[in-house]
Amino acid sequence: MQNYVFVIDTNKQPLNPIPPKKARRLLNKGKAAVFRMYPFTIILKTAINNPTISPCQIKIDPGSKVTGFALVQNNQVIWGMELEHRGGLIKKKLESRSAVRRRRRNRNTRYRKPRFLNRKRPEGWLPPSLEHRILTIQTWVKRLIKFCPVNEIWVERVKFDTQKMQNPEISGIQYQQGELAGYEVREYLLEKWGRECTYCGKQSVPLQIEHIHPRSLGGSDRVSNLCLACKKCNQRKGNKPIEDFLKKKPSLLQKIKSKAKQPLKDATAVNATRNKLVKVLQLIKVVVTGTGAQTKYNRTRLELPKQHWIDAACVGDIETLVLRTSQPLLVTCKGPGGRQKAALNKYGYPIRHNPLKPIKGWVTGDIAQHPLLGIGKVTPRSKGSFGFTPLGTKGYKSCKPQDISAIYRKDGYTYSFC
């Protein structure tokens, strides 16, 4: 089952989304035209007097790496999307830029000194990698409101208790420095270890909390010493040190050790953005918040699979839920591209000139149609022919810019389906 299709009238006002079959019939009869490819939207060619509108709810399941979206109309999920953020890439690029500037300042050349005393961060400032998550979600909410009649926004207001994760036995005065309480350690472990057995990789089986370094040998209850294991692996390991248990699997041993020491950056990212996200969305529409435990209870009670867009549909107080789609739109943030006029090497020296964009009206990532090569992605060049990669292939072909027609203009995202 595919996502429903968005419909707008001749005045570009949103109407009720319709099934793909009905949209295809309108397009074939010439009563509508394609208005936008992603998300797929059609525009009617004739006006409709006093249309009946059924409002929808945008439901959001925020995550540090992937955020789930769902449109629910009369307890029916008609559209789903999973948005993959690029916060990690932003952080990496900022660190690279900082390193280049640091090396440049350390050279024995004329260059301004670093300034710190005149730098003041505004109230509510967030790092660019976190601010990106909020702005991207805000962008997609505004985009969906343009094409769908929305009356409310439902958001899962997740609370991770990082102190309880690190030390489940913390209490009293030791806990006074923290303000977040109530999120179970097991929920974090399920996310961290991918909802599968750490030792054998089995999925969709009951999992037990396992101490990597046994408590009988001095292991602690900190989250860095916890993982998930199926009953069989848990009993086989017993109170053996993990080095003895996995001595015949050195690669798996190294992987578990490195992953166990991963910081709580994902939980921290969600905690840092949850309040500001709600404030930003409240400026757009009425916002209803829900808890993570409530989302999981709804999904378990309705026996739905674990996916980000389904988690979004289960946000809040719901009784029933019917999935009218099983093929969510997968969106990956790529950004608008670099603006440097010269590419730099690892030492900070220019090695290549970057031409100004667009090139003959095209930018890298545009999707076009060629009469012989079909539909594909365009890679423009300043001189000569363009590069053309047909969709679904890895072949790189050449084409003339006058032979292709635009289907989709790059907007900083890439799109695909499950």
Image: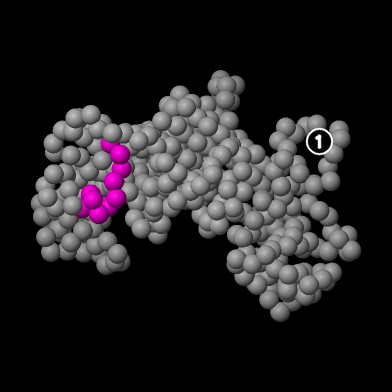
Q: Nearer the viewer, residue 353 or 27?
A: 27
Q: Nearer the viewer, residue 47 or 207?
A: 47
x and y, in percent, of residue 350 in the image: 38, 46
Please give left or right for residue 323 compared with residue 189 in the image: left
Residue at 65% x, 72% y: name it: 200
Q: Nearer the viewer, residue 353 or 194?
A: 194
Please give left or right for residue 275 compared with residue 20 in the image: right
| Residue ID for mark 1 | 175
Name the image colouring: one colour
x and y, in percent, of residue 355 in the image: 26, 44
Residue at 31% x, 45% y: name it: 39
For badge 1, the amino acid type reads Tyr
Q: Nearer the viewer, residue 206 or 403?
A: 206
> Which image quadrant is residue 183 in?
top right
Confirm whether the magenta stretch covers residue 160: no
Residue at 75% x, 34% y: name it: 178
Q: Is residue 103 visible?
A: no
Name the quadrant of the N terminus. Answer: bottom left
Q: Residues within 10 Å of mark 1 (few under 14, many from 20)?
A: few
Give the magenta part as a residue range: 15-24
Confirm whether the magenta stretch covers residue 23: yes
Question: Is 325 above or below relative to 372?
Answer: above
Residue at 86% x, 33% y: name it: 173
Q: Is residue 16 visible?
A: yes
